[in-house]
Image (spheres, helix red, strand yellow):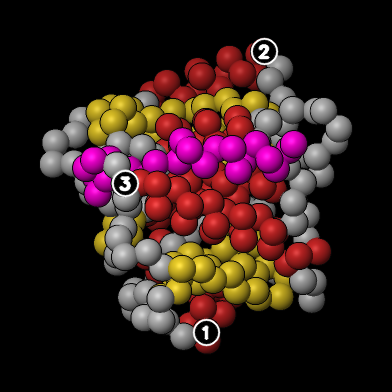
Amino acid sequence: MTNANDVYLYKRSGSYIPRIAAVHDLCGYGKCSLGIAIPVLSAAGCDVCPVPTSLFSAHTRFPKWYMHDTTSMLEPYLDAWQEEGIELDAIYSGFLGAPEQVGAIKRLFREYPGALRIVDPVMGDGGEPYPTYTPELCAAMGELVDGADLLTPNLTEAAILTGVAYEGQDVSLDFVRKTIDALLQKGAKNVVLKGVVHGDGLIRNYVAGQDVELAEVSGELLPYMLHGTGDLYASALLAALMAGNSLLQSVEFASKLVRDAMRVTSEQPDYEVRGVSFETVLGEITQLVG
């Protein structure tokens, strides 16, 4: 077995700017999804090419929101990319608006076989799926596990993907191992399982792979929850990977960055619903590439 600190998923070459397809929703108010992925990955010196899966007026923790499903535009959108000869170094998928959109991501996987595949299975939290996630959409999301170079579920999403009952955030190390093993058996090459909490003031994330031994990354648990932290975590993790850091270094970087952003957020008005304030920590990301 290999130590996660010896695993590199992307080799950065000189001044080359890697290109990433970010397949995610776009939210007008409430910081999350593409509103986070684009600036975070851009700060890491990446060319971000968005593929919007839905348009939201605001994220779904607001009492009033509007959603526009973009499924009908995805095929001609990607057709145009093919005709133009767009090249990709990574494919990063997140929130989807309909089961049919899984086909668009699988198409990208087929057409860019050499691209790094990062799957953030954005489906729910706290034991419940998000309001727009039907059983059909959750099942379709499971099709993206097989072949993912890196899968980044929280405990709720891992439960949905494996079919194992959600047991809360205070789970044993044995439960963590079995959950990650189940996801690896479904075809994921590496998994980061997020959000294990034991009541000792720490939050733990675990990383392991098909040939990578389990490692734990822990940090201070802040006493509030924020919308968009999962998107920030996955985007920061990918930013660190694309900058040429090891898998373990990237997990550590993302964990610290989210905590730093959450501290800034708590000083903002209406921070409970506005979403995580990442703007002032973008400098930490630019330092990844000098």
Which residue appears at 33% of the width and 75% of the height? 168
The number of numbered discs placed on residues in the rendered structure image is 3
Which residue appears at 46% of the width and 68% of the height? 220
As drawn, the residue found furthest toward the left would be: 63
Q: Which mark is residue 132?
A: none
Marks 3 and 1 in Cβ contact (< 8 Å): no
In the rendered structure, which segment of residues is drawn in magenta? 269-290
Point out the tag, 3 or 1, that comes first from the N-terminus: 1
The residue mark sitting in front, 2 or 1, is: 1
SS of the residue under disc 2: helix
Residue that label 1 marks: 173
Q: Amino acid at mark 3?
A: Glu
Q: Amino acid at mark 2?
A: Glu
Q: Position of residue 161 (x, y in %)?
A: 44, 63
Distance Cα–Cα, label 2 vs label 1? 48 Å
The answer to which of 234 and 275 lies nearer the viewer is 275
Q: Is residue 121 left or right of residue 247?
A: left
The answer to which of 249 and 192 lies nearer the viewer is 249
Q: Is residue 177 left or right of residue 289?
A: left
Distance Cα–Cα, label 3 vs label 1? 34 Å
Q: For the C terminus, which image quadrant? A: top right
Vertical comparison of 88 with 164: above or below: above
Q: Which mark is residue 267?
A: 3
Residue that label 2 marks: 84
As drawn, the residue found furthest toward the right would be: 14
Task: Examine the image and state in which quarter residue 151 appears.
Answer: bottom right
The answer to which of 63 and 236 lies nearer the viewer is 236
SS of the residue under disc 1: helix
Vertical comparison of 93 with 3: above or below: above
| Residue 18 among magenta residues | no
